[in-house]
Amino acid sequence: MAKHSDTSWKKDHPSTLFGNSVQKAERLLKHAKSHPEEIAIEHAFNHLEHAENAFTNAVQYGEHLDTVQQNKEYLEQIKQQLHEMKDEV
């Protein structure tokens, strides 16, 4: 039983939630690239906002881990690519 609670703690941990939302943003970016319609790009942008909120939560909880910073940098790259795609559509 203890292992299960350890797992759920990690699953709900702010840095894990942020990492998961960056991965989802990456999937949405890939989808938008393969289906460059306005709705796919907007959906990815909407999730970017969610991921940025997850980053804020991770920072507020004192999650100054290397992975949080790496994920933030990657999220910025995703955001830049989405902006470029939006300009082309």
Image (tube, grey):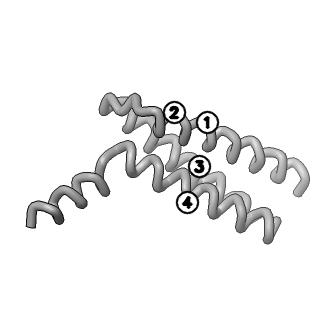
Q: Earlier in the sequence, mark 1 or mark 4?
A: 4
Residue identified by numbered label 3: 48
Q: Nearer the viewer, mark 3 or mark 1?
A: 1
Kind of residue sitting beneath label 2: Gln
Question: What is the secondary structure assignment of the residue under circle 4?
Answer: helix
Image coordinates for residue 64, horizontal then vertical, percent: 40, 29
Q: Residue at x 82, y 65 (%)?
A: 36
Q: Nearer the viewer, mark 2 or mark 4?
A: 2
Q: Earlier in the sequence, mark 3 or mark 1?
A: 3
Q: Quadrant of residue 59?
A: top left
Q: Nearer the viewer, mark 3 or mark 4?
A: 4
Question: What is the secondary structure assignment of the residue under circle 2?
Answer: helix
Question: What is the secondary structure assignment of the residue under circle 3?
Answer: helix
> How much space separates mark 3 and mark 1, taking CA atoms?
13 Å
Specify whether 73 is left or right of 14.
Answer: right
Badge 2: residue crowd in 10 Å (few <14, some 14–19, many ≥20) = some
Residue identified by numbered label 2: 69
Q: Quadrant of residue 7?
A: bottom left
Residue identified by numbered label 1: 73
